[in-house]
Amino acid sequence: MPAMRALLIPSALIAAFAALPAAAQDCAAPPAPIAGTAPLVPIEPEPAAEPARLAPLAADSPWLARFAAAADELLPALRSREPARWQPLLGGRWLGAAERRAVAALLADRCAAFAPLFAASEPIERRIFGWSIPATYSAADRAQIAARPEAEALVCWAAGQDGVAAWPETAAEADNRAGRPYACARITYSLRGGAPSWRAFVERG
């Protein structure tokens, strides 16, 4: 993960929704794919890289209020499932046709991670995560990161009477895969040119 993306952030709504169709749907996990044959030439496996750890955005972060406001706008747009509402927040004309179809399919899937949020009547919990800065970074490095005019965060939501037992610990776990107890979006924020702007990305693992 590029250093600028991974280290920009210091450590650290609901619109009415139409009822889901009454027809039952099997949301059981699909069977595991059948393993292929062994390669003719053995390939030495690459060493696994340690994924960057997520950390809640610090309460004193100057970015926290900005990401919270963006999340407050994004979730109702996603819950509406109306492209006219969510497309402008996901890039507008910069959002490709294939990406639009993928997001629309994710939001329409009653087995996907966003489905419990759409059906929830109880309050929805939210967490805003950044990436932990390695302990090896100096005070000067940290100050340089904090002074940058761009930042990125993962915003995750969960529905449930008693909250969610576990939130994602790495970005790979914020993939909106079916069965996750939370759904997430990545938000990039820029203050360049004196005009604050942000864009959300909704991805599916």
Image: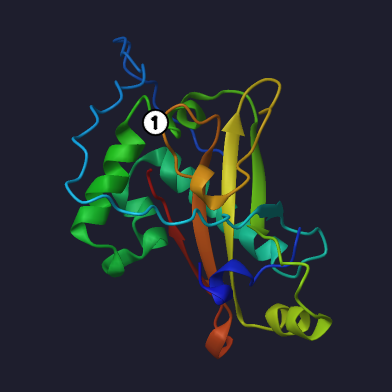
Coloration mode: rainbow
In the rendered structure, the answer to whether residue 8 lies left or right of residue 14 reads right
Residue plotted at (79% across, 86% down) = 140
Taking the image as drawn, is residue 34 in sight?
yes
Label 1 Cα neighbours within 10 Å, binned few <14 / some 14-19 / many ≥20: many
Report the number of numbered marks: 1
Nearest to the observer: residue 28 or residue 191 = 28
Nearest to the observer: residue 158 or residue 29 = 29
In the rendered structure, the answer to whether residue 180 lies left or right of residue 125 reads left
Residue farthest toward the front in the current orientation of the protein = 41
Nearest to the observer: residue 146 or residue 78 = 146
Location of residue 122 in the rendering, given as x and y in whole percent from the top left corner: 62, 24
In the rendered structure, the answer to whether residue 66 lies left or right of residue 86 reads right
Taking the image as drawn, is residue 13 in sight?
no
Residue plotted at (65% across, 30% down) = 123
Figure check: 166 above or below 64 = above
Q: Of helix, strand and loop, which one carries label 1?
A: loop
Figure check: 140 above or below 22 = below
Q: Quadrant of residue 25?
A: top left
Location of residue 16 in the rendering, given as x and y in whole percent from the top left corner: 48, 32
Residue farthest toward the bottom in the current orientation of the protein = 193
Residue plotted at (54% across, 82% down) = 195
Q: Quadrant of residue 105?
A: top left
Nearest to the observer: residue 198 or residue 2 = 2
Figure check: 27 above or below 109 = above
* Amino acid type of the residue that numbered disc 1 sits on in the rendered structure: Ala
In the rendered structure, the answer to whether residue 149 lies left or right of residue 76 reads right
Q: Which residue is mark 1?
A: 112
